[in-house]
Image (cartoon, grey):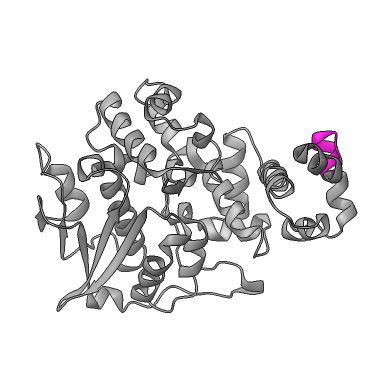
């Protein structure tokens, strides 16, 4: 079974609810575990995710569901792949890094870079399902790419051309708004060409104190209040085992101040420490249940200063010591 990270579904729950549709119903129809709608750390059947997008589009009566979902997401859904791109010096290098490392995100999705005379064509493919089931996924992926390019090239940037395997929609208005007018349908590939001048743009860099993310993939300002905590959670999950994962670092990765981060989370009835603790518990359970890491190694991965601090934290939240939890899982 080919899989994809459940982070690909980030924002789907709140978006579907905007159309007065039950997200759980869509998940059941697509054979997607309902937990995947709220937990971005799961691996789910890639074919089921493609089916989920298409069922959601039909159920909501929204032909451009993938595009709408992309507006609530950012490249942080790519997890480790997103972290690879931060080391690039130019936009072209960043996208190439993403293309090369996509297998870290999914074994069912491929982003190939093909140099051409005018620039580089980025070809998106899935190996789960047939092309008729990829419409929403392809459009979502290319909107995410366009959004990130516009962070550096400006909001007026458009691809040199975009090719789709699928047929053109009843109206081209939305596609032209998002992708420009150089659109081709019923092609033998999905491809989006980024021009050479844009690819050569240097990424916005600033002080990278302690290796924290700075400026490479600055996220656009979005107005989707409901989805902000899940975006924070995804970034925390990305950073917690390899970076300083405090509120300041996460706020910087989101392109906002710590005060704004706290305010937006408060608007959604939560706070940074609550999300951090939830991620720590979730990952601790997973490591204890599924890995052979020692308790001390798990504590270090989750950024506890001492193993005893981790043990107290875990015991308080689960009423079991880490050792007891691991033993119970084995039994």
Vertical arrangement, residue 155 with respect to residue 92, above or below: above
Q: Looking at the image, which residue is at 25% across and 31% down? A: 62
Is the N terminus in the top left, top right, bottom left or bottom right quadrant?
Answer: top left
Give the image quarter of residue 88.
Answer: bottom left
Q: Position of residue 126 (x, y in %)?
A: 30, 52
Magenta stretch: dominant SS?
helix
Vertical arrangement, residue 227 with respect to residue 154, above or below: above
Q: Looking at the image, which residue is at 47% across and 62% down? A: 81
Q: Position of residue 146 (x, y in %)?
A: 29, 58
Q: Magenta residues?
A: 314-321
Q: Is residue 128 magenta?
A: no
Tally the marks.
Answer: 0
Q: Position of residue 223 (x, y in %)?
A: 42, 42
Q: Looking at the image, which residue is at 72% across and 59% down? A: 301
Is the C terminus in the top left, top right, bottom left or bottom right quadrant?
Answer: top right
Q: Is residue 317 magenta?
A: yes
Left or right: 235 in relation to 221? right
Residue 147 can be seen, yes or no: yes
Vertical arrangement, residue 305 with respect to residue 279, above or below: below
Q: Looking at the image, which residue is at 30% across and 41% down? A: 66
Give the image quarter of residue 294.
Answer: bottom right
Residue 158 can be seen, yes or no: no
Vertical arrangement, residue 276 with respect to residue 97, above or below: above
Left or right: 99 in relation to 254? left
Residue occupying the far front of the picture: 331
Give the image quarter of residue 93.
Answer: bottom left
Q: Position of residue 10 (x, y in %)?
A: 46, 42
């Amino acid at each position: 079974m080919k899989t994809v990270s459940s982070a690909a579904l980030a924002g789907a729950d709140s978006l579907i609810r905007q159309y007065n549709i039950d997200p759980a119903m869509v998940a059941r129809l697509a054979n997607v575990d309902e937990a995947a709608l709220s937990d971005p750390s799961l691996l789910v059947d890639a074919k089921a995710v493609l089916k989920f997008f298409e069922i959601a589009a039909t159920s909501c009566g929204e032909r451009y569901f993938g595009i709408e979902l992309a507006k609530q997401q950012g490249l942080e859904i790519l997890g480790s792949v997103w972290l690879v791109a931060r080391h690039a010096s130019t936009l072209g290098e960043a996208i190439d890094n993403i293309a090369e490392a996509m297998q870290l995100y999914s074994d069912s999705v491929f982003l190939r870079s093909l140099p051409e005379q005018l620039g580089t064509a980025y070809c998106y493919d899935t190996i789960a399902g047939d092309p008729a089931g990829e419409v929403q996924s392809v459009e979502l992926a290319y909107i995410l790419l366009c959004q990130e390019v516009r962070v550096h090239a400006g909001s007026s940037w458009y691809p040199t051309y975009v090719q789709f395997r699928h047929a053109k929609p009843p109206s081209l208005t939305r596609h032209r708004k998002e992708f420009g007018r150089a659109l081709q349908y019923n092609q033998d590939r999905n491809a989006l060409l980024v021009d050479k001048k844009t690819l050569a743009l240097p990424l916005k860099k600033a002080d990278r104190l302690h290796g924290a993310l700075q400026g490479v993939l600055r996220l656009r300002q979005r107005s989707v209040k409901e989805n902000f905590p899940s975006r924070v959670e995804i970034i925390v999950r990305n950073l917690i085992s390899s970076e300083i994962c405090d509120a300041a670092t996460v706020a910087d990765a989101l392109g906002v101040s710590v005060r704004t981060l706290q305010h937006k989370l408060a608007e959604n009835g939560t706070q940074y420490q609550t999300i951090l603790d939830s991620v720590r518990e979730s990952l601790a359970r997973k490591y204890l249940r599924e890995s052979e890491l020692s308790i001390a190694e798990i504590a270090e991965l989750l950024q506890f200063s001492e193993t005893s601090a981790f043990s107290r934290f875990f015991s308080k939240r689960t009423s079991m010591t880490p050792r007891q939890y691991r033993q119970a899982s084995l039994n």
